Image (cartoon, helix red, strand yellow):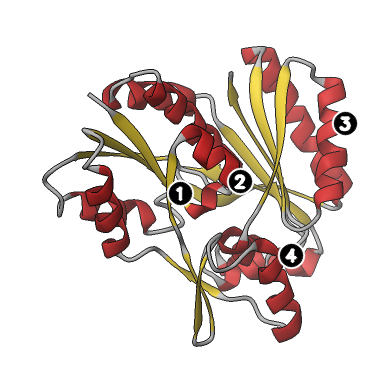
Amino acid sequence: MKTVIVTDSTVYLPIEEREKYNIHIVPISVHFDDVSFEEEITLSVDQFYEIVRKTQQFPKTAQPPIGKFVELYERLAKDYDEIVAIHISSGVSGTYDCALQAAQLVDNVKVYGFDSGVAGGPLASYTIEAAKLAANGASAAQVLARLEDLQKTLDAYFIVDDLVHLQRSGRLSLTSSIIGSLLQIKPILHMKNKKITVFEKVRTKRKALRRVKEILHDAVETYGELQAVVMHANCEQLGRTWMEKLQSSYPTVHFKLAYFGPALATHLGEGTLAISWMKK
């Protein structure tokens, strides 16, 4: 049995890594008024911020059309017996459900879905792990078992500069947004039950970063060796500096730096920092 991995563009993997690990991408749609783009294909992250600055507006996003999945599945069916589709959390996007619907429309390959419950860096971690297993001959069932094991240890936290974007897009409740604006807080957001929720409210970004470090410390105490991803929304130097400080404190954690592309930056806003980790 030959297994192959499919994911969506919120994985934000460089083309070199996609090719190296044989990972296939279905792009999220990004809409500025009546102009549509395919994330990471016809719209790069640099182009995204350039348009935002010129228009002073953030776009809307949409899950890929079912036809995109069907087309890819049928093409992969020529060379593979099984597909593992690993996607952005079903709690913030309809992409995962769309992938499952498309799976019902193809009969020459078996498609297995995995709801990552996250997006961005941790989605990339899942996807690369799955692709390595598939390359070594693992079945879809074996890949899913490994992902489910990793998922039990996953944690992800976000520190945003402004709650407006999350409230506008419906990814956070209006009440939380109003409270955040009034108190001028820097909330620590958390992925819980596949949705973005407020974990704690602190006054400054420095305090928020310090609090997240405390949570990471507890995870290191529990698991020892971890793989972690520090993510940023157009603030690479801030992200890199934070990652290097954490690395010096926790040498048993294997860090990577990643960025939030258009679909996620639309909802999180420029200046967001985030971190995720799971056991190695």
Task: Give the CA separation, mark 4 to mark 1.
Answer: 22 Å
Gap between marks 1 and 2, in whole Å? 17 Å
Label 1: which secondary element: loop
Q: Residue at x 51, y 42 (%)?
A: 192
Kindly state the secondary structure of the residue where label 4 is placed. loop
Q: Position of residue 270 (x, y in %)?
A: 74, 63
For the residue pair 21 and 255, the one nearer the viewer reads as 21
Q: Is 269 on the left or on the right of 148, as rendered?
A: right
At 68% across and 70% down in the image, what residue appears?
Answer: 47
Q: Amino acid at mark 3?
A: Lys
Is residue 133 or residue 219 the one in the foreground?
A: 133
- Residue that numbered label 3 is attached to: 245
Residue situated furthest left in the rendering: 107
| Residue named by callout 4 | 162
Residue type at numbered disc 1: Ile
Estimate the spatial distance between the alpha carbons at disc 3 and disc 4, rounded to whole Å: 24 Å
Q: Which residue matches tag 1?
A: 88
Q: Amino acid at mark 4?
A: Asp
The quadrant of the picture occupied by the C terminus is top right
Whether residue 253 is visible: yes
CA–CA distance in space, label 3 to label 2: 25 Å
- Give the Cα distance between marks 3 and 1: 29 Å
Circle nearer the N terminus (3, 4): 4
Q: Which residue is mark 2?
A: 14
Is the C-beta separation of discs 1 and 2 under 8 Å? no
Q: Looking at the rendering, which quadrant does residue 64 occupy?
A: bottom left
Question: Residue 19 in the image: x percent, y percent?
Answer: 51, 40
Horizontal placement of 48 versus 25: left or right?
right
| Identity, as a three-letter code, of the amino acid under mark 2 | Pro
Q: Earlier in the sequence, mark 3 or mark 2?
A: 2
